[in-house]
Image (spheres, helix red, strand yellow):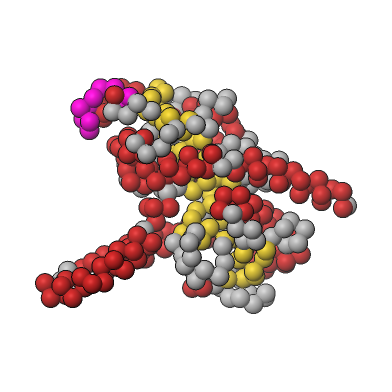
Amino acid sequence: MRILLDAMGGDNAPDATIKGAVLAAKEISSQIILIGNEEVIRKKSKEFFGKDNISDVASNITIKHASEEILMEDTPTIAIKHKKDSSMVVGFNMLKAEEGDVFVSAGNSGALLTGATLLVGRIRGVDRPAIAAMLPADGVKGLLLMDAGANTNCKPINLLQFAQMSSIYLRNTFGIERPRIGLLNIGTEETKGNDLTKESYKLLKEKAEEYNINFAGNVEPRDCFLGEIDSLICDGFTGNVLLKSVEGIGKFVKKTLTDSLTKNIFRTICAAPSLPGINEFKRKADYKIYGGAPFLGVKRPVLKAHGSSDDLVFYYTLKQAEEFAKGNSVEKMTKDFLESRNSTLQSQ
């Protein structure tokens, strides 16, 4: 298994990508290919590990040189078309040519979506690929948020396809036979919401059986983390706001809890018997352990890591990337979409 890692993508690249790759390389069997400026990567390897050659640090890490990088402020389409030797474009071309099995980047989200769509291609029947992010929630697996930021403006048909892709992904990756799919809204009533959510509700309700979607109806944000649904569907703008709000609340709770328990020696001593439970809560609320988010709807495996990812996030994301590729989720999704499409055409 070969993992292609955009070494120059993200706010903390290339430091975080290199350190995260070395951490992950010790625990996974896949080859990790760092794509980026070779001179810069070698200098960082010398700085961090005392070795000019990154392969001397971890034998399953190699470098693929790319002279350019796509910046966060770059216009996605222009960057993909004109920065042909950027780490992101080189990575996509390697993935398309089957010189790698999965591509990971924390770079410009718009450019990542554009590159995945234009260079790798969409699964037939999918209008818009979307980011499927796993959030902390009650239960073993967490809550799958779809779309978490790829498509800021959506139509009801897009949300229907997000629900279908979520169902297929959860069945094939986590073994959830009948994933419960909820539509994010400001109320549970069918008449609540804006035009998009009201029309999407009608379409999901109408097509649920045909597309094998276990539609649970509208879900309010305050109820979505209670373990009663497996996936939450929304447009990418709303999803990204929710994602970052959850991350912010998680950081606030962890900091407040730590400050409170360490305020003085007496609180610290009294809290000692509860430390296992407190640490378990901290672990479960930490978004970093969920790694990156797969782009669902493209022909080859692509994962988006947080733009602010540190080495620990890349460590978890690379482990996740190996499992994602090994699980053949994309091949299974392509097959299921084709069968669904054929079934729909036959019924017409």
Secondary structure mainly formed by the magenta segment: helix
Q: Position of residue 80 (x, y in %)?
A: 52, 32
Residue at coordinates 54% horizontally, 49% vertically from top-left? 131
**Residue 40 in view of the camera:** no
Residue 12, position as x, y percentages in the image: 32, 41
Q: Nearer the viewer, residue 57 or 20?
A: 57
Residue 238: x and y in percent read: 52, 61
Q: 89 and 59: which one is in front? A: 59
Asked if 302 appears above or below 243 in the picture, the reply is above
All told, the count of numbered labels is: 0
**Eyeballing the image, is 42 above or below 140?**
above
- Residue 289 appears anywhere in the view: yes
Please report the residue visible at 26 percent of the width from the left and 30 percent of the height from the top: 44
- Is residue 133 toward the left or the right of residue 125 in the image? left
**Residue at horizontal 76%, vertical 64%?**
206
Which residue lies most toward the left here? 265
Expressed as whole percent of the image width and height from the top left, the position of residue 123 reads: 67, 40
Residue 143 belongs to the span the image colors magenta: no
Quadrant in the rendering for residue 194: bottom right
The image quarter in which residue 176 lies:
bottom right
The region drawn magenta spans: 46-55
Question: Residue drawn at (43%, 34%), measured in percent from left and top?
Answer: 29
